[in-house]
Image (cartoon, rainbow, N blue to C red):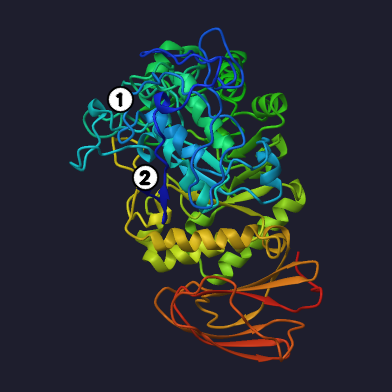
């Protein structure tokens, strides 16, 4: 059952119905209609008999290419009657979900939640996912998503696509809010499900994300999703909205901030939400339930905190201190007032770092508006900030997010998408961040208000390029330099009025990687780059996947002249350089 995904085709195996497997001596085949209950801790394993069902003997699935059979017993699927009537060509979503996980090599180490460490080591690769759209399925091909036909995304449908993310190189999922959505004043089209950032409750999950006809609650299905991601070595980070829906503000007026006239505060034009007070005992008690649900019951690995500057330092210190092993990511930016909103405090990155947050957004979503010098000054400024707050802190390489009015394809098409794919893998102090739809070149914004098909463009070559760059970043040879190596800006002799060529070195021990990129998407560039210590007989071989016409390089001692550097062109060279005497 091949499924076209993010630049690849993942072939999910089709398993023989349970009834066709031989029954081991001493075991009883369950009767038709049997539905085991889900015990605490996950799937009922075959090796742990329970009074609620009689387990099967372990079996070995057939080989699938180089895939190796699991070394653990297959897990009996809860909520599904294991009878001969179960068709192999049209399987229930729960079976498809489990089958998708089974086709991954099961010899990988037991999952250990270490997202905080990945943030600190610059090893996190995060994929933004909105369950509603990521896992939607247009079953009748009419171009629409109709929840009445069960076409909307659910946790179980999303499990089927996790192998795509694994193959891309993702090891962390940023889930947009998964709580129920308020009904009053919803934004979007008539009949729209509304914004996930307008929660009707913080203490339960959105039942729209539960697969109907399965004998599992929405919480149990969400737990299966988290467990499935963990089984593939992928962490899960959930979004923590900053405000309440109108419904919730009516239900809990004691949690809502008000103006001098006693009216609830509304941020900018987000008329479907109301602002919480910055902090109060009642607000903390309410959020205690939220973090217990996410951290203890679902087992997520981290939190992305929306408009984190809207809470007090004491609020965040309380919860970060209570869950110190979780990764904490703040939505704030490094330039003051970078995202101004009515009734919302200005950006305070240093304050949030000092509260205990591990990472914040970078300003890379405006990369398209910078010239080369502005980009380099920004990277240098980031390093100066990290000297003050701690070198283990990091930024997310967010060249686009769900909030951005334009996607990468709208800024510069395939060329620009490949360029920023490369930059997010080589720039210092950042962890790559991929918005759903980017890797296929979807030109549209991620719609968080309406029923929509999964973001999907027509350019899988973007995902293929990104996959190769992520593999370079993760390689034992080049990874240490690209992730944590020193950042050495290089002097580029070019048009001083509008410089377009970026050049720097990432250096770790005796490894020096030279980065050269042309931000101009329309014009070839001719520049001279000063590279101290560069030998005249240095050989240049591009480590990055090649695209476009090759540039011309002339090497002399300490200098590299580049001619015909194509639009949006990116190069990564492994060069022999002595330890640099400057840089950070």
Residue 331 horizontal/vertical position (percent): 55, 40
The one nearer the camera, 341 or 583, is 583
Q: Earlier in the sequence, mark 1 or mark 2?
A: 1
Left or right: residue 532 versus residue 499 is right
Q: The residue tagged with tag 2: helix, strand or loop?
A: loop
Residue marked by disc 2: 446
The one nearer the camera, 509 or 360, is 509
**Mark 1 or mark 2, which is nearer to you?**
2
- When the figure is inspected, residue 74 is found, relative to residue 25, above or below; the finding is below
Regarding residue 241, the answer to whether it shows in the image is no
Residue 223 horizontal/vertical position (percent): 52, 25
The structure residue drawn at horizontal position 59% and vertical position 22%, both measured from the top left corner, is 291
Q: Quadrant of residue 488?
A: bottom right
Residue 269 horizontal/vertical position (percent): 36, 36
Give the CA separation, mark 1 to mark 2: 21 Å
Residue 208 horizontal/vertical position (percent): 35, 24
């Amino acid at each position: 059952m091949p499924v076209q995904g993010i630049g690849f085709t993942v072939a999910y195996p089709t398993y023989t119905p349970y009834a066709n497997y031989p029954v081991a001596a001493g075991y009883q085949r369950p009767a038709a209609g049997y539905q085991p209950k889900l015990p605490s801790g996950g799937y009922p394993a075959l090796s742990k008999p329970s009074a609620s069902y009689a387990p099967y003997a372990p079996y070995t699935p057939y080989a699938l290419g180089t895939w190796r059979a699991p070394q653990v017993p297959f897990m009996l699927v809860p909520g599904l009657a294991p009878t001969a009537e179960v068709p192999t060509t049209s399987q229930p979503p729960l079976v498809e979900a489990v089958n998708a996980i089974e086709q991954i090599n099961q010899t990988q180490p037991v999952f250990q939640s270490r997202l905080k460490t990945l943030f600190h080591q610059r090893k996190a690769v995060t994929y933004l996912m909105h369950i509603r759209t990521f896992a939607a399925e247009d079953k009748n091909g009419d171009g629409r998503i109709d929840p009445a036909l069960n076409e909307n995304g659910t946790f179980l449908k999303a499990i089927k696509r996790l192998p795509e993310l694994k193959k891309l190189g993702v090891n962390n999922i940023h889930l947009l809010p998964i709580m129920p959505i308020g009904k009053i004043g919803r934004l979007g089209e008539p009949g729209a499900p509304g914004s996930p950032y307008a929660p009707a409750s913080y203490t339960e999950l959105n039942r729209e994300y539960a697969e109907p006809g399965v004998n599992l609650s929405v919480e149990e299905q969400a737990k299966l999703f988290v467990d499935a991601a963990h089984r593939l070595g992928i962490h899960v980070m959930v979004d923590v909205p900053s405000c309440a829906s109108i419904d919730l503000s009516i239900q809990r007026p004691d949690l809502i901030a008000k103006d001098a006239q006693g009216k609830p505060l509304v941020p900018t034009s987000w008329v479907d939400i109301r602002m919480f007070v910055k902090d109060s005992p009642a607000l903390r008690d309410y959020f205690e339930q939220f973090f217990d649900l996410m951290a203890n019951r679902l087992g997520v690995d981290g939190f992305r905190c929306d408009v984190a500057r809207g809470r007090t330092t004491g609020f965040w210190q309380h919860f970060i201190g209570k869950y110190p092993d979780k990764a904490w990511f703040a939505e704030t930016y490094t330039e003051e007032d970078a995202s101004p909103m009515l009734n919302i405090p200005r950006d305070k990155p240093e304050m949030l770092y000092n509260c205990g947050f591990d990472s914040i957004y970078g300003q890379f979503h405006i990369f398209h508006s910078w010239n080369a010098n502005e980009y380099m000054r920004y990277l240098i400024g980031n390093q100066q900030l990290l000297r003050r707050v701690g070198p283990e802190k990091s930024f997310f390489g967010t060249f686009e997010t769900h909030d951005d009015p334009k996607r990468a394809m709208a800024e510069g098409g395939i060329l620009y998408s490949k360029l920023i794919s490369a930059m997010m893998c080589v720039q210092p102090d950042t962890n790559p961040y991929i918005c759903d739809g980017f890797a296929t070149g979807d030109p549209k914004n991620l719609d968080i208000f309406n029923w929509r098909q999964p973001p999907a463009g027509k350019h899988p070559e973007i995902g293929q390029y990104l996959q190769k760059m992520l593999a370079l970043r993760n390689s034992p040879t080049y990874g240490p330099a690209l992730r944590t190596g020193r950042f050495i800006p290089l002097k580029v002799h070019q048009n001083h009025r509008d410089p377009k060529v970026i050049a720097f070195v990432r250096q770790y021990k005796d490894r020096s990687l030279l980065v050269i990129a042309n931000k101009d998407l329309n014009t070839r560039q001719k520049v001279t780059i000063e590279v101290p210590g560069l030998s005249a007989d240095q050989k240049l071989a591009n480590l990055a996947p090649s695209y476009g016409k090759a540039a011309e390089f002339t090497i002399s001692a300490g200098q590299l002249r580049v001619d015909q550097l194509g639009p949006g062109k990116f190069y990564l060279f492994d060069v022999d350089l002595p330890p640099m005497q400057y840089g950070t």
